Amino acid sequence: MLPGSGYTNGYLPHGSSEKRIGLSPRERFRRGSRSSRDSRSGHGFRVSGQERPRCTEFDMAYFQSYSHVGIHEEMIKDRVRTETYRAAILQHQSSIAGKVVVDVGCGTGILSIFCALAGAKRVYAVDASEIAVQANEVVKANNLSDKVIVLLGRVEDVEIEEEVDVIISEWMGYMLLYESMLGSVITARDRWLKPGGLILPSHATLYMAPITHSERYSESIDFWRNVYGIDMSAMLPLAKQCAFEEPCVETITGENVLTWPFVVKHVDCYTVTIQELESITTRYRFTSMMQAPFHGFAFWFDVEFSGPAIFPANIHGYSPPVASSDTYSPGSSQRKKRSKSNEALVLSTAPEDPPTHWQQTLIYFYDPIEVKQDQVIEGSITLSQSKENPRFLNIHLEYASGGRSFVKESVMR
Ligand SMILES: C[S@@+](CC[C@H](N)C(=O)[O-])C[C@H]1O[C@@H](n2cnc3c(N)ncnc32)[C@H](O)[C@@H]1O
């Protein structure tokens, strides 16, 4: 998912070409009520003891960005994404049929409809973007209005007068955590999920690996050394800054990766907390498997669709089945390995897997570092929600190799 297409790293502009169609939203579907949280307490639901987060101007711009058809078209056309979700719903059909589901951020309603077709008794399709108006039309056109209840509002604000058996959501941003939508899934879980209920996806893992990418470097930087026979090297500092100051969303291949990846963060959606996501720091250590210019780091993620019972260790801390720098094996073998061990479907955005609209996120250095085979690359990475806008990601990267050390700060905005 992404607000905006291509490498924008941002939200679509306000107010551009939004259409209001026909009747008011209220006439066409139920709008999520914004009654106070206290009104829930008599119904036996779990409510977090915390104030619900305020809907800021940044949030409003974010929801506005999702009212445009292009974003939804791109997500739905990403067959790896959409078909893996559909396969996961079918795989968990026995936990969905006859049950109550909430779709956190339903968009056009596609996942809600998949769940209804899989036999769900009732699906609450919640979205704070006006795209929910369209979702309601789609639901009606498919004669599913008796099963799918579209609520226009934030998950943090809408009221659902019953507990749910299943939460489904497509919340993943670039580098997994950009957009900070996982917090809303956690809110939904803590507000409505029955004990033992199902969350799809259930687990997520963010990986990083050092990469070499001479073509990309030449294209943006070396190009300036000789332009129609003119030495334009004076442009180099500006070219490096413009090309590499911020993270880039691009597609690389397994051939760009210098060694096995490292797990930056493993998330268990059954137990993760909002506080845990505010700032994540991890130390890493790689050993380069080849001699090559080292241009930066790639980040990607996968999500897994497991039931809670598959991981009895959930409550006490869960160890991921793969993905330390030592145990990961590239290529489809990773997915096969995971499927074999726990039968869970995995949606992967790894460079060696079929491409998705998330591509990979690259943090390039301003200058490459020559590494030899077996040379150690080590350091730390901190990902934290920006104070300015929690949907932005501040990235503090420290890296050292061959006796030299560096720090790179960037913001994914
Ligand atoms: C990545 S899209 C997924 C849309 C749809 N589920 C799909 O798979 O095509 C995420 C959607 O979640 C909505 N969203 C994000 N945070 C939300 C929140 N706190 N409450 C309600 N909707 C939210 C956005 O407006 C957006 O439409």
Image (cartoon, helix red, strand yellow):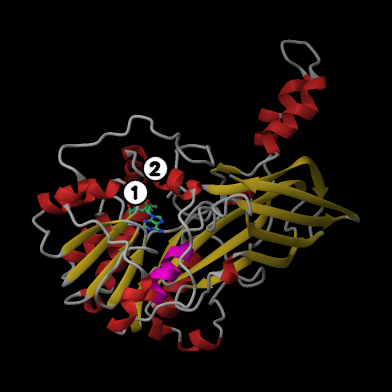
- Please tell me in which quadrant of the rendered image residue 217 appears: top right
Q: Which residue appears farthest toward the right when viewing the image?
A: 403
- Mark 2 in CB contact with mark 1 (< 8 angstroms): yes
Provide residue 120's location: percent of width, then percent of height: 18, 71
Magenta span: 182-190
Provide residue 178's location: percent of width, then percent of height: 54, 53
For the residue pair 22 and 242, the one nearer the viewer reads as 22
On screen, residue 74 above or below 312:
above
Q: CA distance from mark 2 to mark 1?
A: 6 Å
Lateral position of residue 38 relative to residue 283, left or right: left
Residue located beneath label 1 in the image: 129
Q: Ligand 1 lies in which image quarter? A: bottom left
Q: Is mark 1 within 8 Å of ligand 1?
A: yes
Residue located beneath label 2 in the image: 64
Q: Residue at x 39, y 86 (%)?
A: 309
Disc 1 crowd rating (10 Å Cα; few below 14, some 14-19, many 20+) is many
Magenta stretch: residue 183 in it?
Answer: yes
Lateral position of residue 280 relative to residue 360, left or right: right
Disc 2, SS: helix
